[in-house]
Image: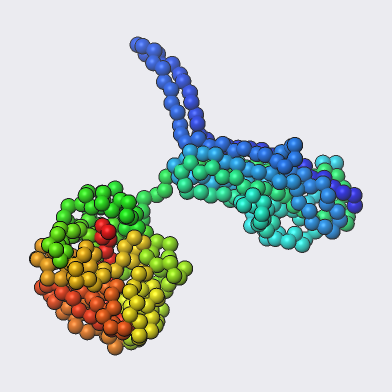
Amino acid sequence: MALSTFLLSLTIISSALLVEGASAVTYQDSVDVSFTFNPTISINLSSDTPTTDLIIDNLAPGSVADSNTLTVSVTTNAAYGYYLTATAGTSSTNTDLVNTSNSNYKFTSLAPNADLSSLTTDNTWGYRTSDDNGSTWSNYSGLPKDNDDEGATGKSLIETTSPADNRSIKFKIGAKASTDQASGTYTNIITFYAVTSPEPEPPVGPDPPVTCNTPVPNITYMQEINSSNVATVMSNMTDNAQYYLRDSRDEEPYCVSKIKTKNASEEDQYAIWMTQNLRITGTVNSTNSNFSTHENVNVCERDLTAGDSYDEARCHDSGNTENGVWYNYAAASAKTILTSGNSTLDTENICPANWTLPSYDTSKPAGSINSLAGSDSVTVTAFSPVTGGYYDGGSVNGPGYGYWWSTTANYSFSRYGLFYSGSSLGTSNGGRDFGNYIRCVRASL
């Protein structure tokens, strides 16, 4: 077999997106109409050879070789990003590379998800990409047929969600030839589609409780509140009123309230408290959580009905939104505070990102359990405490009271906590192997 040359023609389709037109409508007067559709999107192709055709010019029998490099660049001002796909052939033909002189000689078509990572099969071809300027390349894989539906079933090359995202990807084709494959030029068409992403669907999740069915103004998720906007968020909330926010990890809605308290110097201060108990279970990821020590944490390695533990993350789901979930401290701290002898201050926990467990601090700063302890009936009502007890020895104890974790050690084996007597709030402490409730807080610190 002589050396073969592959020449792939390229078709570029840029979906849509700046359309302008004008027309005249006559009724009694002439009216000019013009309109513009945005966003805009465009594709640019550039090659490391003078032509944009993809050419393999050194393929020998039994060997694998790939083409020159094509850089596919997409520019857009789309608010929700875009996706770039590629297809080979058309709906009426196939995805083979066909010899221009004799169609009996071809490199066989590829399934959309064909695994051709090493091109070990004779007379196959595929493509690979690099998104780091050619330093590393993906394995070979297959391209589907173009079914004329604007690339919806094409092979995804890039998918973005960011506005005005401009990005490039490098693209090659490769082939493996058998000894009986005829030399010559083999061609096909690769089509690239760039399509702007639609506005995402609104959050899907349970309806908020009727007691707090007003959303926090201009905020959807708890994780969206940060040090830059917390003051503005609080200014849009009425003191002690009930609102709701969702936890982006599972779309669960939680009642929250901006609660006004006083510190030890009798100065007014504010914090946004969850006014329902946390109820996330299973594996919690670090992306939208208040921990980074682990990639993810299973907060329910075992049920608290199995007994107490300092080292294994255990929880028990009450089965209702009022009582939520009891967590031992291994679970509450995202497994950062373990063993029976550990008085380290908890700085990581399973609260949503930008939120945390409350602290214990006798100066009563915002976000401490001390700021709520001994507070008036208005504050207690805003906090909406519940009873239900705590888990110890595999069962519920003190069912007429409520217990919530804090970040602060009392002894090496225990932590301070918020305590509800059924009528008032105070502080207490409990063994870290027990199961308590969690209420997360976002202070204006």
At x 38% / y 84%, what residue is drawn? 339
**Residue 187 shows up from this direction:** no
- Left or right of 188? Residue 285 is left
Image quarter (top left, top right, bottom left or bottom right) of the C terminus: bottom left
The residue at the point 82 percent across, 41 percent down is: 100
| Farthest residue, direction front | 265
Instruction: Judge by depth and name the residue closer to the eye, 429 or 257.
Output: 429
Q: Considering only vertical position in the picture, is 176 above or below 168?
A: below
Q: In which quarter of the image is residue 340?
A: bottom left
Measured from the top left, where is residue 156 in percent x and y?
Answer: 58, 50
Residue 230: horizontal and vertical position, in percent?
Answer: 28, 53
Q: Is residue 146 left or right of residue 59?
A: left
Q: How many labels does the image show?
A: 0
The correct choice, above or below, for 70 with respect to 377 in the image is above
Residue 418 location, quadrant: bottom left
Q: In front: 385, or 367? A: 367
Q: Which residue lies furthest to the right in this view?
A: 1
Q: Position of residue 43 (x, y in %)?
A: 59, 38
Residue 26 position (above or below residue 197): above
Observer-nearest residue: 127 or 379? 379
Location of residue 62 by image quarter: bottom right
x 47%, y 36%: residue: 39
Tell me where residue 245 appears, x and y as whole percent.
28, 57
Q: Is residue 78 visible?
A: yes
Above/below status of 423 relative to 143? below
